[in-house]
Amino acid sequence: MIELKTAKEIDKMAVTGQFVAHVLATLADSAEPGVNLMQLEHQARAMVADRGATSCYWDYSPSFGRGPFRNVICLSVNDAVLHGLPWDYVLHSGDLLKLDFAVSIDGWVADSARTVVVGDSADAADTALIESTRRALAAGIAAAVPGGHLGDISAAIGEVAAAAGYAVNTEFGGHGLGRTMHEDPHVPNRGKKGRGMVLRPGLTLALEPWWGRGTNRLTIDPDGWTLRSADGSNTAHSEHTIAITEHGPRVLTTT
Ligand code: MG
Ligand code: MG
């Protein structure tokens, strides 16, 4: 079932979204060479506790994971792209770090992700990869207008990937959210314009283009969580929580 949110409820999600964006920006600044991923996890835990927020990840145990998850943030490095389990790893200059974070405040969820290059030695192909997911996210948001179709968003995201030569995996993508982190509908990162449900004001979605420099196939780590590109190529991920309003798309995960 898809629940359309009122303007007041969307405002509440924006409060959560502002905190999520603040945490991601803070952690992205902390992600320097020599920093252990567990330091970032503990920094996130402290911020969640200080704010009185509820982690959407802690104790999360979906069918695909070897749950329950016992961290508040997903950290995925280089070829790892989604659901990265924070572990005892020291960041190196040039690492591609994906930070994916979702919490609930006063019962309303926001979910966002960003990719950063650690240190100053970014590979040009990695930078182009990250930029493509950001452009795709912007294109998906621009297509999230009332009267449009869900497929318009998927198509807009997928067209950016295709133009840049990246293969899209349609198994994991965006999703509805609000009272919980994962609600209907699923929003694939590839699709056809004019297909799917009609977009109405009050629909809240997490859009999350992600892909790798090589294959769209994934492998899963023995930890049961971390998803990696099957060919070991680097990956990137960008995500915002948005609301469709009468006036167009509103990004909720901004500071
Ligand atoms: Mg996320
Ligand atoms: Mg998400």
Image (cartoon, grey):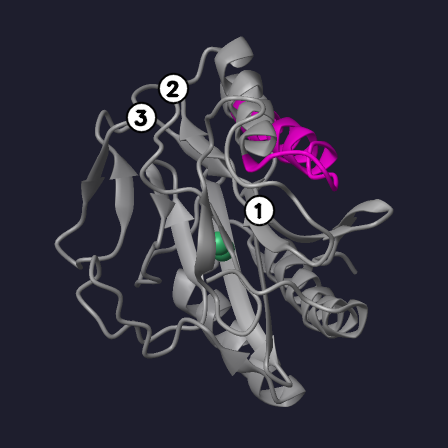
Magenta stretch: give its range. 129-150
| Residue toward you, 49 or 242 | 242
**Disc 2 + disc 3, Cβ < 8 Å:** yes
Quadrant for the C terminus in the image: bottom right
Indicate the quadrant where residue 120 lies: top right
Q: Position of residue 65 (x, y in %)?
A: 22, 61
Q: Is residue 91 above or below residue 39?
A: above
| Residue toward you, 141 or 100 | 141
What residue lies at 39% left-to-right and 49% top-to-bottom?
76
Label 1: state its secondary structure: loop
**Separation (CA) of disc 2 from disc 3:** 5 Å
Label 3: state its secondary structure: loop
Q: Earlier in the sequence, mark 1 or mark 3?
A: 3
**Disc 1 residue lies near ligand 1 with CB under 8 A:** yes
Q: Earlier in the sequence, mark 2 or mark 3?
A: 2
Q: Is residue 125 left or right of residue 217?
A: right
Return the residue at label 3: 216
Q: Name the residue type under label 3.
A: Asn
| The stretch drawn in magenta includes residue 149 | yes
The image's mark for residue 239 is 1
